[in-house]
């Protein structure tokens, strides 16, 4: 492992102890940062206005807006992580895609992406993105 | 409780008890009196779904936490189960492959552990019966001996499954499952949500939706909130079952007594009762499971109609079992395994690798100061199993060479497979086990001890179908 990578990951593992207080205050708010991340990572998608904002609001309401959670997110920002390095970011992006009509449209990037409500098999209309609901058996080619 | 004495007293309402009762009721006279003692309560599936939707329900109080019911001495190992009417049918995931014939013959075929005192052919007719009662969906061509069609057609393959099936034939098949591939009279068709512990659409077989009819039978009296802690015995015969209900100590006598709780509680009740068999509570465990994510190059894994689409048997049976464990592959189709790279979101398959383990004496169940709570000591995995994990990693690239594999990512072993096996193992004689081939206790000959606790060895296949078939078998042979 490269030394810089090690220091970065160790920072997360050490639970914020290396984040200078001054940088904590200059980091953007959690919601604002989460929005920036979604737009940065999914730059190639046409996300309809308000969709990512509503998703972020619901996501953090579900997650809980506690101080520890906020601190962790700000640390993530300071360390300039992306979804390959941070499970937290990975979950944020993954659940945005699962909570939208992106998979219903068979990952067609040309179609606008709308947020349909937080992904849950018990409450949301969004099916398993792999499943026969979107890809009926007759559409799966024989090898 | 209507009477002081019953022809049959049965503890628990899960798979083991319910399938036993189904067969028993079909064979005995109409004047028999049966008492069923259930520790928990009736918590309907529709109410469980409400909880998942954050909708208040008066039944919430019946969601009894399993963690509080026993003392777990191994904090890194989890043992989830469900307390209440239907037992763990309320939290199982509906996988119902049969065992392979050699799973019953580990000693004579491979020199490992012990043979079961019965074999595949003894269970074969009861496998069919259990599959019929559960309306199992499955393929016609299976790696284990089986003739004809399953009650329901198989689930649909994904693209990865199709390629694997074309390469390996009946060594890679649609998984037989109790997640209905079509709607039935009492269940809906599976929608592949992959949250089977509480199925959002009631497609999974449970005791509640089973239509077995046993608890509505006029011969059967069912008591809820009845916690059994001990059996009273005299001259190697069980005389009474002692339990508490609403804080009151109670006792009931039975001509025949059946323990159908899970292996933790069956063992605890036996140990509380003075069972001196040195193997009671010993050698419990379960399979080791781990996940491999298979990143695919320019190919999606779209398709599939349920959570576990397929089973692979390429690492299961064979002479390698002389040296290391069998492994069953489960092809998962879960939404949370998507990729985030542009254009590759569905280019991933996820296989669960399930390894058999051995009944080790270092893993055991004991009583505690609380008569209702067993202590569970799980110390270790066998080297037999750990060696199989290394072997699997060597073989997996070759097995997957029919797919355009970009990379493999092995995740850490899971904390549980949702199974509790052993503790009252089955054997020919009392020196090698606790119960005989009919699940009758070697010492107390009017006592049946049902369930996966009786398994002599822990093959990699999911245990529930075999638990159910064993219950049908033993009730059929004994009454």
Image: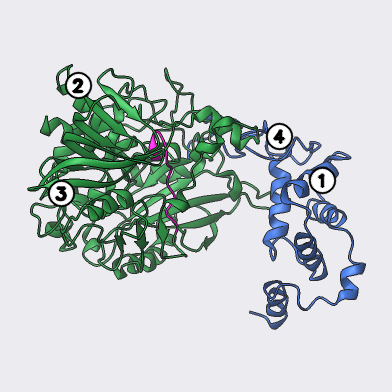
Chain colours: A blue, B green
Residue B81 inside the magenta-drawn segment: yes
Q: Residue at x 40, y 42 (%)?
A: B247
Q: Nearer the viewer, residue B343 or B477?
A: B477
* SS for callout 2: helix
Pinpoint the chain carrying mark 2.
B
Q: CA distance from mark 1 to mark 4?
A: 24 Å
- Dot 2 surroundings within 10 Å: few (below 14), some, or many (20 or more)? few
Front position among marks 2 and 4: 2
Specify whether B264 is left or right of B118.
right
Which label was assigned to residue B323?
none
Front position among marks 1 and 4: 1
Q: Is residue B136 above or below residue B362?
A: above
Please give the residue where the numbered disc 1 appears in the rendered image. Answer: A57
Q: Main secondary structure of the magenta part?
A: loop
Please give the residue where the numbered disc 3 appears in the rendered image. Answer: B435
Quadrant holding the C terminus of chain B: top left
Earlier sequence position, callout 2 versus callout 3: 2
* SS for callout 3: loop
Instruction: Find residue B172 and report its image quarter.
Output: top left
* Residues at discs 1 and 3 in contact (Cβ within 8 Å): no
Q: CA distance from mark 2 to mark 3?
A: 24 Å
Q: Residue at x 8, y 54 (%)?
A: B429
Q: Residue at x 22, y 30 (%)?
A: B4
Give how far across and how far down residue B69 sits, in percent.
42, 51
Magenta-drawn segment: B78-87
Please give the residue where the numbered disc 2 appears in the rendered image. Answer: B26
Q: CA distance from mark 4 to mark 3?
A: 56 Å
* Residue B145 visible in image: no
Earlier sequence position, callout 1 versus callout 4: 1
Please give the residue where the numbered disc 4 appears in the rendered image. Answer: A105
* Residues at discs 1 and 4 in contact (Cβ within 8 Å): no
- Dot 4 surroundings within 10 Å: few (below 14), some, or many (20 or more)? some
């Amino acid at each position: 492992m490269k030394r810089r990578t090690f220091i970065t990951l160790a920072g997360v593992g050490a639970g914020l102890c290396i984040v200078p207080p001054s940088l904590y205050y200059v980091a953007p708010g959690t919601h604002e940062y989460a929005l920036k991340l979604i737009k940065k990572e999914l730059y190639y998608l046409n996300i309809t206005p308000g969709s990512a904002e509503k998703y972020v609001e619901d996501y953090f309401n579900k997650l809980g807006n506690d101080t520890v959670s906020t601190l962790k997110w700000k640390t993530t920002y300071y360390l300039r992580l992306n979804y390959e390095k941070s499970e937290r970011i990975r979950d944020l992006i993954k659940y945005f895609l699962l909570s939208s009509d992106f998979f219903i449209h068979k990952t067609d990037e040309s179609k606008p992406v709308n947020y349909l409500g937080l992904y849950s098999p018990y409450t949301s209309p969004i099916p398993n993105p792999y499943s026969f609901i979107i890809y009926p058996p007759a559409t799966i080619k024989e090898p | 409780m209507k009477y002081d004495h019953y022809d049959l007293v049965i503890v628990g309402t899960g798979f083991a008890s319910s399938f036993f009762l189904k067969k028993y009721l079909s064979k005995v006279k109409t004047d028999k009196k049966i008492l069923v003692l259930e520790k928990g309560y009736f918590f309907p599936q529709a109410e469980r779904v409400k909880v998942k939707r954050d909708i208040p329900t008066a039944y919430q109080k019946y969601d009894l936490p399993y963690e509080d019911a026993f003392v777990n001495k191994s904090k890194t190992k989890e043992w989830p189960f469900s307390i209440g009417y239907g037992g763990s049918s309320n939290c199982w995931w509906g996988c119902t492959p049969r065992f392979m014939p050699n799973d019953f013959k580990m000693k004579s075929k491979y020199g490992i552990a012990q043979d079961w005192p019965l074999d595949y052919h003894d269970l074969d007719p009861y496998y069919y019966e259990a599959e019929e009662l559960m309306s199992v969906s499955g393929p016609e061509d299976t790696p284990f001996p089986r003739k004809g069609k399953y009650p329901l057609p198989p689930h649909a393959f994904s693209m990865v499954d199709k390629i694997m099936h074309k390469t390996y034939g009946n060594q890679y098949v649609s998984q037989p499952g109790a997640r209905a591939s079509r709607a039935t009279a009492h269940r809906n068709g599976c929608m592949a949500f992959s949250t089977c512990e509480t199925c959002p659409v009631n497609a999974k077989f449970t005791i509640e939706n089973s239509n077995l009819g046993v608890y509505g039978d006029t011969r059967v009296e069912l008591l809820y909130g009845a916690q059994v802690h001990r059996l009273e015995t005299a001259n190697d015969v069980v005389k009474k079952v002692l339990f508490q209900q609403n804080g009151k100590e109670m006792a009931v006598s039975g001509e025949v007594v059946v323990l159908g709780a899970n292996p933790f509680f069956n063992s605890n009740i036996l140990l509380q009762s003075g069972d001196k068999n040195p193997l009671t509570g010993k050698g419990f465990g379960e399979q080791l499971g781990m996940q491999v994510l298979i990143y695919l190059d320019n190919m999606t894994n779209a398709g599939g109609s349920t959570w576990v689409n397929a089973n692979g048997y390429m690492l299961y049976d064979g002479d390698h079992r002389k040296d290391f464990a069998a492994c069953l592959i489960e092809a998962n189709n879960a939404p949370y395994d998507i990729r985030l790279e542009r254009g590759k979101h569905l280019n991933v398959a996820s296989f669960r690798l399930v390894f058999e383990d051995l009944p080790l004496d270092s893993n055991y169940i004991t009583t505690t100061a609380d008569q209702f709570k067993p202590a569970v000591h799980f110390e270790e995995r066998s080297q037999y199993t750990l060696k199989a994990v290394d072997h699997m990693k060597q073989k997996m690239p070759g097995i997957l060479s029919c797919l355009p594999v970009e990379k493999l990512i092995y995740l850490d072993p899971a904390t549980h497979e949702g199974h509790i096996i052993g503790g009252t193992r089955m054997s020919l004689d009392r020196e090698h086990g606790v119960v005989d081939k009919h699940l009758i206790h070697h010492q107390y000959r009017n006592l049946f001890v049902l369930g996966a606790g009786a398994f002599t060895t822990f093959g990699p296949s999911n245990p529930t179908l075999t638990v159910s078939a064993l219950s049908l078998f033993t009730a059929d042979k004994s009454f």
